[in-house]
Image (cartoon, helix red, strand yellow):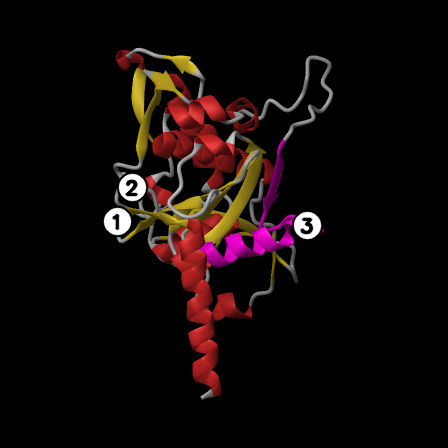
Amino acid sequence: MYCIYTDTIISPTDSSEEHIIPLSLGGKNGFTIKVSKSINSNLGAKIDGSIEKDFFINATKRKNGYKGHSKKLAKYRVYATIAETGEKVEIRYVGTENYLYNPRTKKKYTEEEKRQTVLDVNPPFDYTIRIRFVAKVLLGTGYFIYGNTFKENVDHENLRKIMNWEVLDENNNDIEFPLGFMDEFSNVPENSVPIHSVFKTVCAALACSCVIFVIGPNQIIGAVGIGGRYIGAVNFKANGEKFDFKEGPYDGIILAIQNNKIKRGSFHNFLKKIQSFKKKKGGSKND
């Protein structure tokens, strides 16, 4: 069998099931592919595990009540400093609740004390993990939906390099990649603002974890959302003529995990629904 993450043929005994989006980030059993057992373990620890430490993504996960195999919300903490005294404290998240804790004095602050305490907070944020996660999800989803069409007509080699963060050549110089990346915190180029805004709108409207592919003649733009939050997008080279569409010569697809079901639909059709809804909403306000 073929492994999209390593671009190699592997034996069934060397494979394991990979949740393309982890259950703890809104994924689902069934939204999986077979990949190399060793790479699955490695990516699970270095990418999936790391992105859950992102403050904003972890907050989205908790808001949506996403749980992993343990069926529990994992504990999480953010380190902070009390502005007035410089004392080191922690914001601890347990289940859907959080509290302020001083590890030196072992004091757990009351809700009133917490409200009255001004904190300097530096939440965990790693830009590279976001782009690696998006590249990984796009690789897995592309092969999940399109199979060999994706394998044979897409520049998945450079997606794989980004996923593995192979960004330096043998002389430790930055590699120039024939692809672009943007996320919710990027300074987006002016010509990319429209599609960037569309992705944010679609992710928010779906209010779930999702993957979007917009396919053109020479490229694909893929975007990933977690729990209604737009995470990022990558555009990469592809032979768009080899892909089949229901709407027009070029379209796209949305794969969304809603109510524990995998749903697929036309990207353009979904945009029409959003536009129609906005028109009706605007009309009702003017009536």
Name which quarter of the figure residue 166 lies in. top right
> What residue is shown at x 31% (from left), y 32% (from top)?
32
Q: CA distance from mark 1 to mark 3?
A: 36 Å
Q: CA distance from mark 1 to mark 2?
A: 7 Å
First in residue order: circle 3 vs circle 2:
2
Residue that numbered label 1 is attached to: 260
What span is in magenta?
Answer: 179-203
Near-viewer residue (159 or 121): 159
> What residue is shown at x 50% (from left), y 34% (from top)?
240
* Labelled disc at residue 191: 3
Residue that numbered label 2 is attached to: 28
Element under disc 3: helix
Q: Is residue 93 visible?
A: no
In this view, 42 is above or below 279: above
Task: Tell me the crowding category of disc 3: few under 14, some 14 to 19, or many 20 or more residues within 10 angstroms, Cα based.
Answer: few
Q: Is residue 214 magenta?
A: no
